[in-house]
């Protein structure tokens, strides 16, 4: 709960809140013991469905932003439920593509990023024809515009640049890709102040292009005379 509270009160969520968005910071099932379980996705689908019922929320104007594993989930959600747009900051698409499997990782759980370094370094070794077909089917289901924001430090970018971004373009999806040179993984919330501010401005501008109902500040109560 403390980690969730810290994230919800961070600079990026606070900027979205100040810009007039309803902001929800969800938690979801762990994938450390089974990286390809759909439990986390089901949790996030339930959160999105609940958000659409909130007072003051236009159900057709819900957007999702996720970092790393959350970015992979954002891409999954874009193919499973109606959204206005999604933004993924260096999405951990070893998950989306299915390469981050128990078989490829080896050994016993829990699994973490360090166990997947070899996969990220040489993704083509692990991207079998079966996983390619699976990935293309998931990409084809994506029904909303996608923003991918990336730095140039983390090895996950190799998979995104060589596989995921080309597949999104091949499928004709509405896609915007923005680079943040020199920024490390997680820069949207843990990067330099300039990168965090730029990420918010870029993502806000991207979302607003596709939102039927624009974010708006609530009316201020009238002051007594």
Image: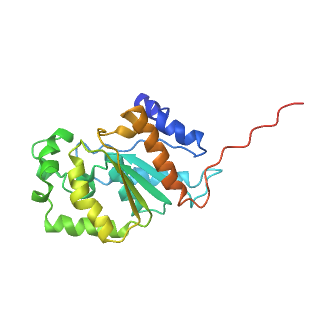
Who's the residue at 17% across and 49% down the image? 120
Who's the residue at 61% across and 54% down the image? 214
Residue 92 spot, x, y in % from top left: 28, 49
Closest to the observer, 17 or 103? 17
The total number of labels drawn is 0
Q: How is the image coloured?
A: rainbow
User: Image quadrant of residue 135?
Assistant: bottom left
Residue ranking furthest to the top: 2
Left or right of 31, for residue 81 = right
Left or right of 216, for residue 96 = left
- Which image quarter is the N terminus in? top left
Residue 111 spot, x, y in % from top left: 19, 41
- Which image quarter is the C terminus in? top right
Left or right of 195, for residue 110 = left
Is residue 111 in sight in this rendering?
no
Residue ranking furthest to the right: 225
Who's the residue at 83% across and 32% down the image? 223
Is residue 44 in sight in this rendering?
yes
Who's the residue at 23% across and 43% down the image? 154
Note whether 59 is above or below 8 in the view shown. Answer: below
Residue 200 spot, x, y in % from top left: 47, 43
Residue 157 spot, x, y in % from top left: 24, 50
Note whether 94 is above or below 60 in the view shown. Answer: above
User: Image quadrant of residue 128?
Assistant: bottom left
Closest to the observer, 199 or 56? 199
């Amino acid at each position: 709960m403390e980690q969730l509270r810290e994230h919800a009160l961070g600079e990026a969520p606070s900027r979205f809140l100040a810009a007039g968005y309803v902001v929800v910071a969800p938690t979801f099932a762990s994938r450390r013991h089974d990286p390809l379980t759909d439990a986390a996705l089901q949790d996030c689908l339930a959160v999105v469905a609940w958000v659409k019922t909130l007072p003051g929320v236009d159900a057709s104007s819900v957007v999702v932003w996720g970092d790393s594993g959350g970015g992979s989930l954002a891409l999954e959600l874009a193919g499973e439920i109606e959204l206005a747009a999604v933004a993924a900051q260096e999405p951990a698409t070893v998950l989306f593509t299915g390469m981050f499997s128990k078989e490829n990782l080896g050994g016993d759980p829990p699994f973490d990023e360090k166990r997947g370094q070899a996969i990220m370094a040489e993704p083509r070794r692990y991207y079998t024809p079966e996983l390619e077909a699976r990935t293309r089917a998931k990409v084809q289901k994506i029904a909303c515009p996608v923003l991918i924001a990336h730095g140039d430090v983390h090895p996950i970018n190799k998979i995104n640049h060589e596989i995921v971004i080309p597949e999104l373009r091949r499928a004709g999806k509405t896609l915007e890709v923005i680079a943040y040179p020199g920024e490390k993984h997680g820069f949207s919330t843990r990067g330099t102040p300039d990168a965090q501010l730029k990420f918010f401005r870029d993502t806000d501008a991207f979302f607003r292009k596709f939102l039927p109902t624009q974010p708006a500040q609530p009316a201020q109560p009238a002051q007594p005379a």
